[in-house]
Amino acid sequence: MTILSTELRAALSAGTGPETPLAPRYVAIADAIEKAVQEGRLAPGEKLPPQRALAYDLGVTVGTVSRAYDLAARRGLVEGTVGRGTHVLAPQQPGTYGRGVGSASFLRIAPETPIPLKANLPAPIGQHAAVAQAAEDVLRQNALRLSLADYYSADQTGEDRELAADWLSNPLFKADPQHLVLCSGAQQALMTALMIATEPGDLVLGEALTYHVIHTQCRLAGRRLKPLPLDEEGIVPEALEEACRTQRPRALFLVPTLQNPTGAVMSDKRRARLAAIADAHQLYLIEDAIYTKLTQPQRPLAGFTPDHSILVSSLSKTVAPGLRYGMVLCPPRLAERARAAQHALAQGLPAITIAMGTHLLRNGEAARLAGLQQQECRARNVLARETLGAYLLCPHPDSPHLWIELPEPWQREGHAYAFVEAARERGVALAADADFAIAAPPPRAHIRLALGAPESRALLEEGLARIKTLLDDGPLARRDLT
């Protein structure tokens, strides 16, 4: 175990890491492990030394090594098993390391991080009571009570699809319920879209920084995924056209409205241009429209190219994520294929979930909750702008997430995880740029703040204040943690 007897000792010399000045010792150890895994000097399956033995060898406490191993595990580098010890995991693609939004570890927040600004959850605006009431209401329906134990098909009643189509519609766009398929959440809808638009081995393009579930799903489905560069509106059209001309992709996944993580909103002119490229190259545009109810109505890509757009959405960000009520709007020729794909993925849908979601759409509760969510999101944006000011990069006033380029002292740390770990030490959970990167993270380090998860505005304000202290003071603010 040369790496842990030589490089780690060097990383801890004078209390500093090789690329992370003034970092806590456990972070320096985790950074050195990560570097060794990335460079192939720690092989998959290799067992790390017992914590007590490594602590003695390095001259640190057992607690320091324990925290370093835990951090390495949360980064997806190692896995610890009681009775077997800690082993190195196989390296993944750059920027993935089990830390992206689509990874199992992303939502796992340590007990010492009580201010959650990491996961993009809706703000508490009374949705729990509304969903509970919806459950009581639908369970009073005798017909439903007699069918809860049966398989349920979204085609059993046209009302479900009609109400879902109304949810996707706006003054600029009308969704056709005949081409809509209900799913168990937007993630299943996204997988359905991939199944119907592409075949195994096909190339899928995505935003260089995006909702990382697309990376996981492409890998599971045997699709190849490559990034395209972004500007202040989203996908760069020239890059898309060049990729279509030289690489023959089958689909492009993108979030045109309140893009995740940057918060950008694509203009109609840009949408029209992307649609024209899609038509010319027979490319399917898979649009994640999950945030559209939080801002002014936008015309989706399906309004520009109905034959080459697949619209994915759900009630998760505006009503309640636990409902798992999703929808996918397909081009007419793919609707039957989408129904078959959804059936293959889930053998129908949970009757109680569909009944509750439809009930909330029918009685107007879903629209009311979406309006309240938009208001709360705007209020939380105001708090963020008042606290963080110039650190925010062109924040959209309706965005539930904010994108911050770290100031120069933090850029010298080498990656955004140094800031994320410093924030975690102060009880704030954040997301780093690599959590959203299809390939390598951007050359300048960034973090994303999700505004909805704190249970109150006061808790959000406290988290923002702690972040500002770190931004203002730089890595020197970590001295008390070393």
Image (cartoon, grey):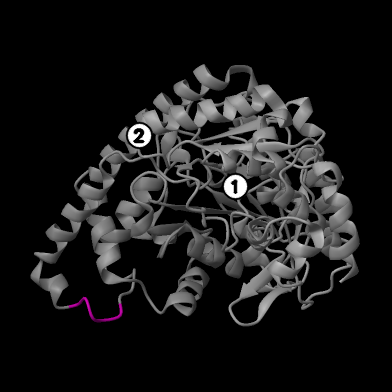
Neighbor class of circle 2 (other Cα within 10 Å; few <14, some 14-19, many 20+) is few
Residue 475: percent from the left, percent from the top? 73, 32
What's the distance in space between the residues labelled 2 and 1, CA to CA?
41 Å
> Residue 358 lies in magenta, yes or no?
no
On residue 305, which mark appears?
A: 1
Main secondary structure of the magenta stretch = loop
For the N terminus, the quadrant is bottom right
Type of amino acid under label 2: Ser
Q: Residue at (27%, 70%) from the top-left corner?
A: 351
Q: Is residue 357 left or right of residue 240?
A: left
Q: Residue at (27%, 46%) from the top-left corner?
A: 127
Residue underneath mark 2 = 456
Specify which label sits upstream in the sequence, 2 or 1: 1
* Residue 92 shows in the view: no
Of 283 and 71, nearer the camera is: 71
Q: Is residue 475 left or right of residue 339?
A: right
| Secondary structure beneath label 2 | loop
Residue 437: percent from the left, percent from the top? 71, 49
For the C terminus, the quadrant is top right
User: Which range is magenta?
Assistant: 147-151
| Secondary structure beneath label 1 | loop
Question: Which of the 4 image quarters holds residue 356?
Answer: bottom left
